[in-house]
Image (cartoon, rainbow, N blue to C red):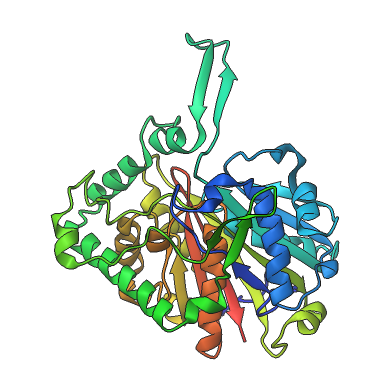
Amino acid sequence: MSKAAEMLPRARIPYGTWGSSYFPAWQTSALAEVNIGQFAGESMNRIMGLRKVPTSEIEYLVIGSTIPWHWKFWNAPLVASCMGHRVPGYHVEQACATGLQAALLGGAEIQAGAHDVVGVLTFDRTSDSPVGVFPERRAHERTQAIADVWDNFGFDPATGNAMITAAGITARKYKVDRRETDDVAYHRHQQYFKAKESCFLNRVLVPLDVLNVQGRPLGRIDDDLGVRKLTHGGLRAMRELDTCVTSGTQTHASDGMACLLITSKEKAQELSPRPEIDIQFVGKTETRTQPSLMPEAPAFAVQKLLDRIGLTMADMAVVKNHNPFAVNDVIFSQLLSYDWRKMNNSGCPLVWGHPQGPTLTRVLIEALEEAVDLGGGYALVFGCAAGDVGIASVLKVS
């Protein structure tokens, strides 16, 4: 018997009280020039204004980011001040799972009865990420400098492997065919451009202006810069960087923010432009697999979650994931016996990039919009985090 809809029964996501910036690729936009925490707070204010939700309704703020930014010590209260509404809150960080984890924690705040309206705001700037200097008394190098993005992506201290190596190792374990990963990448790009041409993404993505300290324009963030149309021939010709991994079958570093509200049922009906739409949290789980086998971890998390809530893949109206490598989708398809062509109908991080913190928040928002278009149903959102962790959540739209 299904146990669905038992998680966070008090919490709701009010339809339409959300939005995301575009995700321009590393060093391609004015976002490379700004304090991303300040930009995120100001952008949430702008997005809530467009959604006709006064920021004064927000009682608490959960923020999520993974890359150090200037004045990060001051955390959610600083970002709230940049949003123009002084409320308390805290910061959460779980690598690429941050965007989904922040939304779930916002739901937990509502469920606990601590608040009726929680803002969830996630962001990251991979461009010009800082270099940290760490005193290390137990190492032969007494001082170590670490470039936050590139050194961490290139070296898992638990295994010594890079993230791209984890994709290659897992591809070899499952005997993935290079032709299939090329096919996945091509199909995912087609899905993205179809969603863009249909204006579906206009309901999620908000053009935002970036100003300098004098208030003069630095640039307008109005495109997922770095996304290019691919051909089958072009993909086939790309050099293999590791097993089944090429520049076309992996994501790219980018910058951006995304936000949404989590509320009580009563507040959701008050704040949503379509109060008849009800969005509930059904379930969530995480798993950890063996070292450097990250691409299989999300599939294990999904299977564990479905078993726990008594649903199957056939029950899912929308399936959408964070897929830094096309390998992830091929392995998910193998392990869950699910056609990867039915996933990610409006695009995915493989195509539009990987700013880490807001990645799964944008995935979640797009999944909910797609479920509404279908007339409701279960939406499965999942992804990976760091070297070998998978996270999955199911929501119900009715």
- Could you tell me which residue is drawn at 26 percent across and 67 percent down? 186
Q: How many marks?
A: 0
Q: In the image, 56: left or right of 158?
A: right
Q: Position of residue 86 (x, y in %)?
A: 86, 55
On screen, 130 above or below 113? above
Q: Position of residue 154 (x, y in %)?
A: 39, 35
Q: In the image, 168: left or right of 277?
A: left
- Could you tell me which residue is drawn at 37 percent across and 54 percent down? 251
On screen, 360 above or below 152? below
Q: Considering depth in this image, is 162 or 296 the residue closer to the camera?
A: 162
On screen, 84 above or below 33? below
- Could you tell me which residue is drawn at 40 percent across and 39 percent down? 291
Q: Position of residue 246 (x, y in %)?
A: 24, 51
Q: Pick the quarter of the image with the N terminus.
A: bottom right
- Could you tell me which residue is drawn at 71 percent across and 58 percent down? 42
Q: Is residue 215 visible?
A: yes
Q: In the image, 275: left or right of 186?
A: right
Q: Is residue 8 visible?
A: no
Q: Pick the quarter of the image with the C terminus.
A: bottom right
Q: Considering depth in this image, is 26 or 218 the residue closer to the camera?
A: 218
Q: In the image, 341: left or right of 264?
A: left
